[in-house]
Image: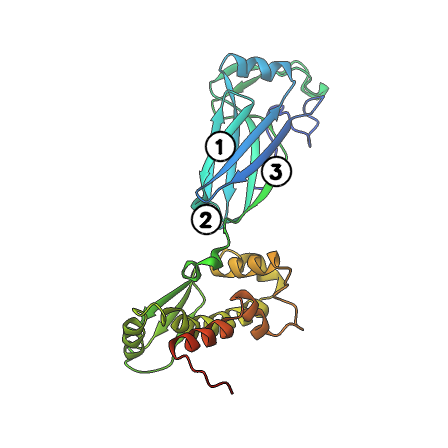
Amino acid sequence: MIIHDRSFPYPVLAPFRDDVSPNAFGFEIVVTSDADNYYIEARFNCSNPTLEQLVGRGAAVYAVQLECKRNYFRTLFLSKESIQRIVVRASDLVGRVEANGFILACEGVGAYAIEGAHSDYGDATFAIQSGDVLALSTTQRFDAYIDYDPLKQISSILTIRKSESTDEGEMQLDTNDDRLIATLSQRDYERYTDLKGDPMLRPLLANEIVVPALLEAVHEIRSVSDEDLDGEMSKRWFRSIVKKLESDGIDVRRPDLPALLIVQKLLKLPLRRTLEGLIQMNPTDEKV
C-alpha cells in the first residue's frame, strides 16, 4: 500500500500533511537477506513530545506494515522500540515490497490533543481508539529476489517429467510455472531414466534436454513486453536467467545477440563438454 495522503478526523503527524508542526516523522529501512530470510531493520525518528509520551507509557506503539502484492503478503509488526528488527521468510516475499511506518494507539485516549496541532483545530480534543493512526510515514520500497546463482544446479529452474498421456512423441516445455517443466513422452522418459544411471552419460543426456529448453526460455524472455517484464520476474526460472546473464554483463533482451549464443554462455559451452565426454567414452588415436 503506497501512502500519499489520507484524511483523518483528528490531527495526524505526517511529513506530507500540515496537521502538526513540525511535521517531521522519520522512517527508514535497511534490508539484508540470506537464502532463508529477509532481515529488515526499521528505524523511526519522532520528536513530538505528545507521541513520545504515549509510546513511553505504553499507550501507543511503533508499527511497520509490509506488503508484497504478488504473494498476497501483508503483515503488521508492532514494537515499543524506535528501532525494530523484522525477520520474514524468503518464500513470503517476491518482487516489489512496500513498507509503511506508523505510530498506532494501543489503548483508548478520551481527550487526545497533540502538541503542535494546526491552529484550525483550536482547543478541540478527540476520542482515540485502540488501533487509530497517530503518525504515518512516506512509503519505502525494496525488491525481494533471492537467487544464489541457481544455474549452478539447473534442477533449481528445470524439472523433467514423464507424460501422462503420450507414449511416443516430442518433448513439451511449460514456461508458466516457477520452474521450466520439460515433459518427455513415456518411452523417452524411460530411456532417459535408464541411461542417466551411467555417470558418464548423465551430463550428455542433460544437454539434450537443457539446451532446447533454455533456448525456448530465452526466446520467451525476449518476447515479453517492457510493461509485462516486472510481472514475469516473479517466475524463478525467468528472473534466474535474467539475473545470471546480467551478472555476466549480458543483456538477454538485446536483439542483436543470437539466442543460441546466449544459451551457450549460460551453460559454459555445452557442446564442448558433450564432445569431450564422448571422446572419453570412445577414445581413438585417429584424428580427423
Q: Secondary structure at mark 3?
A: loop
- Position of the N terminus, as image quadrant, is top right
User: Please, what is the three-letter code of the amino acid marked with disc 2?
Assistant: Asn
Colour pattern? rainbow
How dense is the environment of label 3, judged by Cα within 10 Å: few (below 14), some, or many (20 and up)? Answer: some
- Front in this rendered view, residue 121 or 114: 114
User: Please, what is the three-letter code of the amino acid marked with disc 3?
Assistant: Thr
Task: Report if the CB atoms under discs 2 and 3 are less than 8 Å apart.
Answer: no
Separation (CA) of disc 3 from disc 1: 17 Å
Which x, y percent locates residue 15? 68, 30
> Which residue bears the numbered disc 2?
71
Please name the residue shown 51% across and 12% down the image: 57
**Mark 3 vs mark 1: which is more N-terminal?**
1
Which x, y percent locates residue 79? 49, 24
Q: Secondary structure at mark 1?
A: strand
Please name the residue shown 44% across and 62% down the image: 154
Which x, y percent locates residue 151? 48, 59
- Front in this rendered view, residue 261 or 125: 261
**Mark 1 vs mark 2: which is more N-terminal?**
2
> Which residue bears the numbered disc 1?
86
Please name the residue shown 36% across and 67% down the image: 160
The vertical placement of 117 against 146, above or below, is above
Separation (CA) of disc 2 from disc 3: 19 Å
Q: Quadrant of residue 142?
A: top right
How dense is the environment of label 1, judged by Cα within 10 Å: few (below 14), some, or many (20 and up)? Answer: some
User: Please, what is the three-letter code of the amino acid marked with disc 1?
Assistant: Ile
Please name the residue shown 62% across and 66% down the image: 253
Which x, y percent locates residue 94? 49, 49
Q: Nearer the viewer, mark 3 or mark 1?
A: 1
> Which residue bears the numbered disc 3?
139
Residue 286 vs residue 185: left or right? right
Task: Report if the CB atoms under discs 1 and 2 are less than 8 Å apart.
Answer: no
